Structures are given as C-alpha cells and as structure tokens.
Amino acid sequence: MKKSLMALSSVLMLGGSVSAQKVEFEHYTLNNGMHVILHQDNSAPVVITSVMYHVGAKDENPERTGFAHFFEHLLFEGTQNIGRGEWFKIVTGNGGTNNANTSDDRTYYYEIFPSNNLELGLWMESERLLHPVINQIGVDTQNEVVKEEKRLRVDNQPYGNLIAEVKKNMFTKHPYRWATIGSMEHLDAATLEEFQAFNKKYYVPNNATLVVAGQFDPAQTRAWIDKYFGSIPKGAPVTREKIEETPITNTIRARYEDPNIQIPMVVASYRTPSMKTRDARVLDMISTLLSDGKSSRLYKKLVDDKKMALQVGAFNFSQEDYGMYILYGLPMGGTTPETLMTEIDEEIVKLQTDLISEKEFQKLQNIYESQYVNSNSSVEGIAGNLATFHMLYGDVNLINTEIEIYRSITREEIREAAKKYLNPNQRLLLDYAPKSDKAQN
C-alpha cells in the first residue's frame, strides 16, 4: 500500500511539473522571409541567440557530399567585420559560449551570453549570414579540421561507420544514403566557387529560423532583430525535389568489416516514415520498451537472463523525410550473431502478436512525461526545440502539444506498428564484422 501511494504521489507530482512546463513564445516573419521566435525566461540572466538553416546533408550534390557539415565549421572562420580567428575570442571574451551541429536535414548555430550581451549575439549571427568571408585560406584550414574529425569520430572509432553503412544500404535514391560528414575526396575536389555557390543558395534569411530565448526586453529585442536582420536581402526560394524510395519487400543483406573492433555486431534496420508522422512516435515507444534501461525487454532477456549479449538495443533514427528503425546486438561467449538475431526477432514477434501489459504501458507513459519535462528544462533545450518544431515539423507549438500525441498512443497502436514496419522481408541485415586477416592482407 505504501509503495502504491508513493507511486501515485510521483505521478501526480510529474503531472504538475508537465502542466507547469508550458513554453510561452511569440513568433513572426520578417519581410525577407526569416522566421523569428522569441521565448522570454527571466529566471536567470542569460540569453541564447540561435539560427537554424534548412540545409543538411540531403541537400548536397551527390558528387560533393559533406558540404553542409563543412559549412558548420567554415562559417566560424570570420566575416567582413569579424577577423579570421576572432569569432571564439569575441564570444569567450564577453562571457559566452557557442557551438553548431549538422544533421541530414538542417544546420544549427547558437551562442549563450549573459543577457546584457544579447545585441552582440544578434550582430554576430547577422554577420554570419550577411558578410561571411569564404576564401581559399578558410576552406583549406577547415578541410584539415574536418579530416581530423572524421579520423577521430569515424575512421578510428569502434563501430564508427555503423550509421553510414546502414544508410548506404537502406537508401538507393534518397540523399540520406550518404554520411553527414561526407566524402573527403569530394571536399578536396571542390572549388572555391562551389563553396560560395552553396552559401549563396542556402544561407539566406528565407531559409532560416532565428530564436532568441532567455532574459531580454521584448520591444528592444524586436528592434535589434529588425536592425541587424531586417535589411538582409531575401534569397531565391529554396526548392527541394521529393524523392521517394521503392518499398523494401525482400531482406537486404550486406557486410562491412571494421578494423577497430574484435566483436561482431548484428544489425537489423527497417525503413520507417517521417518523424512528423504519428507512427514515428509509436516506433519511439517501441524502442523504449525494447531497450531503455536494464528492465527493458531486450536487455533483461539477452544481457541479464540468458547472458547471450554484451549489449543489445533498439532505436528509432527518425528524420524529416524517412526514418530507420535499428536493432543491434553484440553477441557474448559462444553465441553467434545469427542466434542473437533469432532471439531479438522473437521479441518483435511478441510485440506483433500480443498487447503489451498495462504495467509496461504505464511505465512508457511515465518515461515520456519525464522526457517531455527534461527536454524543456533548460533555455538552451527550449531554443533548439522551438527552431526544430518550426523548421522540420511545420508547427512550433508542438513544443507544448507533442506530448499529447504520445499520451494518446494506445497499446493496440504499438502492436499494429510492429506488424506494419518490423517484418523480416522489410529490412536490412548488416553483418558488421571485425576485419578479417584476408582483408588486411
């Protein structure tokens, strides 16, 4: 009885936290097409200026992959009014931090400053957009930086090519088929004019979302935004061809040999719909059920009880156009990858056949309530969510309402999604193996 009361108390407290977490914002569009989102939070004297550009690896020329990620680095080189190598000095010298990241769908830049430096953050981001210096010195410098990043994070990292190998075999037409970091040969072959043309095409205000979040005066902030961004010329509309993949109807088999590993990995990947769909959220819940924590189905069965795997997991790699639902495992002892895959498949069949228990379902609901609270627990997280929901989902208020979608998902939908998407004839089976002696010779 005591445990029940404690559990009920936790749920009620969590429910209160979720209700209190509603994110207030205002948003509007400048005449040049730049979308602006403002979120005021006076709880701490900090402010974030961030800009998300709707350009990622999928927007690249297949013969020039890696451009989007390259620009994540290149656009810190300097501008007409910020000297080369001065960007980070200005930020840190004014008590701030900054960073950027790239995906297949977008590129995101941000600064975190004490709130009295908001104007500086806005000016710097307007400089990145209006006056970037893209010259050969910067290209050559960042080319070496990107090569080193690839060596550290991909080439010399155990299982570092996993996602790239899955993508390469899952997609034959869509530009998700290449790695976000791209090809070093493509970057080496690119001309300065090609980099400048990429910037001119995608780094335009009508392809960008500006977010200001934190402590600020709204009227003054709107005035500064108009001052620094309002006069930037609108670019040509960015158009994208909708590329559809042929459905997978027979198992795809592939092999990759990684010189950085000793233990093979069994991998199964299924093509899934856009992250904007309801089914994508259902698949999120399935991955949580299967592999989130030591009490999850796959971990409990294959790591704890049967001791057949060192590690096992499932995750929904969800993106703007398509997703990939990936199952993986590292066999232990005498267990073969094939045997481990058979055991994993048994759990998928259970999901396709039986409704999950009410207890498991309530646990899922609690996990997603907690994730919702945590995702909006910092101004930095809120800024990123606001930009993402506007740009990639087309609905900025999902920052408040997406949790309602997760709350409304039923046990029956979980079963139906498993039946619809997670079938052997709809997947890639990737043998991710240590490099053989024969291959090394």
Image: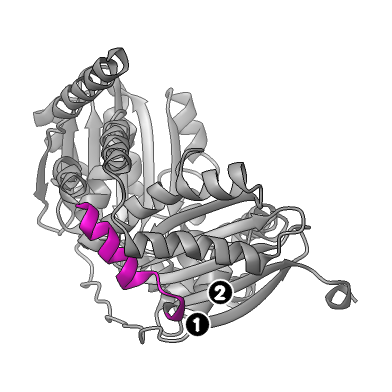
Q: Indicate the position of residue 242 as horizontal and vertical percent values.
A: 27, 80
Compared with 63, 179 (above or below) is above
Q: Is residue 236 above or below residue 203?
A: below
**Viewer-nearest residue: 169 or 80:** 169
Q: Is residue 319 above or below residue 436?
A: above
Are the residues flagged by discs 2 and 1 in contact, CB closer than 8 Å? yes
236, 327: nearer the viewer: 327
The quarter of the rendered structure image containing the N terminus is top left
Q: Which of disc 1 and disc 2 is earlier in sequence?
A: 1
Q: How many marks?
A: 2
Residues 400 and 97: in front is 400
Q: Which residues are magenta?
A: 410-425
- Residue, x 26% and y 65% (percent of image)? 416
Residue 28 point in image, percent of width and height: 9, 48
Query: Residue at the spot x=72%, y=53% of the render?
Result: 332
Q: Secondary structure at mark 1?
A: loop
**260 or 389: nearer the viewer:** 260
Q: Is residue 433 visible?
A: yes
Q: Is residue 10 magenta?
A: no
What kind of residue is marked 2? Answer: Leu
Tell whether 257 sits left or right of 281. right
| Residue at image mark 1 | 251
Question: Which label sits on residue 429?
Answer: 2
